[in-house]
Image: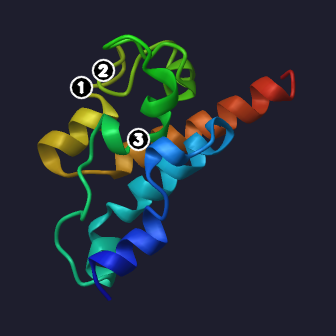
Amino acid sequence: MSKKSWKQEYYAMPARKVEEFNALQHSLQKWIGLTQENLAKHGIKNPPIAVDSKTCALCHHYINIPDDCFECPLAQSRNGTPCDSATDDEDKSPYIAYKREGVPEEMIIALQKAIVYLENKKGGK
């Protein structure tokens, strides 16, 4: 196992090549790969990619103007709050939790909620 095997499993395609309809799933897969368990499974301690807007398929599709994330399904599912800003119910945002503490689980939960939000929105619920 190696950085290469991690990329094959969790980041097989660069964010800029991901179709918009697959952006949420691509992002979720990347974040699942950032858990300590999944890094260790591949024999690495740190992600083999930068964890920023350049490796985020959602950012690729939804950031049109710097700091304008409001069309992003993740932001929409968080009542218009981007992943790098805390909601009234949070001490820190999911992205900042990762950047400061190396905790990807909060982003994983947020992305899973965004997927449900989008499915409900498409279903007219």
Q: Where on the picture, by quarter, is residue 96?
A: top left
**Dot 3: few (<14), some (14–19), or many (≥20) neighbours within 10 Å?**
many
Q: Is residue 70 left or right of residue 94?
A: right
Q: Which residue is mark 1?
A: 91
* Residue 1, position as x, y percentages in the image: 32, 89
| Direction bottom: furthest residue | 1
Q: Which amino acid lies under the numbered mark 2 shown in the image of this protein?
A: Ala
Q: Residues under labels 2 and 3: Cα distance? A: 19 Å
- The amino acid beneath tag 1 is Asp
Which residue: 45% across, 73% down? 8
Residue 24 image position (x, y, % from top left): 57, 42
Please state which of the two labelled residues, at mark 1 or mark 2, is closer to the viewer: 2
Q: Earlier in the sequence, mark 2 or mark 3?
A: 3
Which is nearer the eye, 43 or 88? Answer: 43
- Which type of secondary structure does the marked residue at label 1 adopt? loop
- What residue is disc 3 on? 56
Give the residue at x 32% y 63%. Answer: 35
The residue singled out by tag 2 in the image is 86
Q: In this view, which residue lies farthest toward the left? A: 100
Q: Earlier in the sequence, mark 1 or mark 2?
A: 2
